């Protein structure tokens, strides 16, 4: 891990430059992400502006890896996912606790943008835990283009 400690905070050397973070405020993926199961701890990089809808989850274990996430309901209002009992247990929350559904967003070389609606991330600020779930049989795609009217 490429980090150094400074007064309780740590610093990651990332492709975005040095990022200071509080180790007590990391987001924990107990099962990692699909294809990156070994990566469990992430920090959220600050948004560029208060109205910026993008979140950058920066890996603590692999500082060169980060993932952009967004609320898919901004583009697909009917897209709603609720954690089941197994997910609630892994997130260490109850049904009534707040959580957010996010999806990875990809900006392609051909200027197209896609969202991974097949494998959303459920995040809860109560425990700072997150899970990526696979919606097998849902009809959702890993590379869903943004709607034309966006």
Image: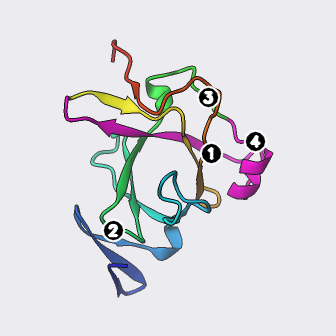
Q: Earlier in the sequence, mark 2 or mark 4?
A: 2
What residue would you read off at disc 4? 84
Q: Determine if the magenta segment contains residue 45.
A: no
Q: In the displayed image of the protein, which residue is found farthest to the top?
A: 149
Question: Closer to the observer: label 1 or label 2?
Answer: 2
What residue would you read off at disc 3? 80
For image coordinates 32% across by 73% down, the residue present is: 12
Residue 63 got which mark?
2
For image coordinates 60% across by 51% down, the residue present is: 131
Q: Identify the image quadrant of the C terminus.
A: top left
The Cα atoms of the two marked residues, 1 and 2, are separated by 26 Å
Q: Secondary structure at mark 3?
A: loop
Question: Tags 1 and 3 in contact by the CB under 8 Å rule?
Answer: no
Q: Which residues are magenta?
A: 82-110
What residue would you read off at disc 1? 99
For image coordinates 64% across by 33% down, the residue present is: 136
């Amino acid at each position: 891990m490429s980090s150094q400690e400074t007064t309780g905070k740590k610093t990651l050397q990332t492709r975005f430059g040095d990022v200071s973070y509080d180790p007590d405020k990391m987001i924990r993926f107990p099962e990692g992400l699909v294809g990156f199961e070994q990566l469990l701890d992430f920090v959220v990089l600050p948004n560029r502006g208060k109205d910026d809808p993008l979140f950058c989850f920066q890996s603590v274990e692999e500082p060169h890896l980060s993932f952009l996430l967004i609320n898919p309901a901004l583009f697909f209002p009917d897209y709603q996912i609720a954690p089941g009992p197994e997910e609630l247990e892994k997130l260490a929350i109850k049904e009534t606790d707040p959580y957010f559904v996010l999806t990875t967003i990809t900006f392609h070389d051909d200027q197209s943008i896609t969202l991974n609606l097949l494998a959303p991330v459920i995040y809860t600020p109560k425990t700072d835990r997150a899970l990526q779930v696979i919606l097998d049989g849902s009809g959702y795609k890993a590379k869903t283009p943004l709607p034309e009217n966006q």
